[in-house]
Image (cartoon, helix red, strand yellow):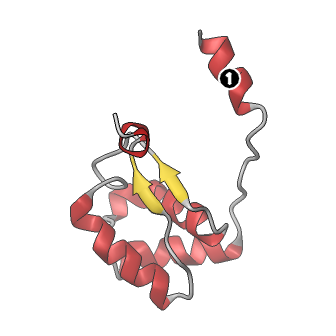
Amino acid sequence: MAQSRLAALDQIPLLGVSKEAASLARLLVEKGPIPEKAAVDALHIAIATAHGMDYLLTWNCKHIANAEMQGGVAVICRESGYEPPVICTPEELLGV
């Protein structure tokens, strides 16, 4: 089962950390709702945003798929010239 999941991921490109994503991640921590201890989570959001992804799927509901933080994240992304992705869990996307 794990091998089939890994095989499915072979067709999905990896998104790199650009200067734009790193800068946006810093803003999400400095100006936004993401705490310093979750800077890696801010980078995850920023990479998806800077690459223009429509969705960011995650099971991290503490700092990423967190309804209380998403409004602030969206404001900072838009102020920075980006449209944020829809952030949700895989189950939410599939309507499970």
Left or right of residue 45: residue 10: right
Q: Nearer the viewer, residue 42 or 11?
A: 11
Which corner quadrant holds the C terminus?
Answer: top left
Q: Residue furthest left?
A: 68
Residue 41, image x, y percentages: 44, 55
Q: Residue at x 57, y 68 (%)?
A: 49
Left or right of residue 56: residue 2: right
Q: Residue at x 35, y 82 (%)?
A: 31
Q: Identify the residue under disc 1.
A: 6
Q: Secondary structure at mark 1?
A: helix
Q: Tell me which amino acid carries mark 1.
A: Leu
Residue 85 lies, with reference to residue 60, above or below; the image says below
Residue 87, image x, y percentages: 42, 57
Q: Nearer the viewer, residue 33 or 1?
A: 1
Neighbour tally class for label 1: few under 14, some 14-19, many 20 plus, Cα within 10 Å: few
Residue 9 lies, with reference to residue 2, above or below; the image says below
Q: How many marks overall?
A: 1
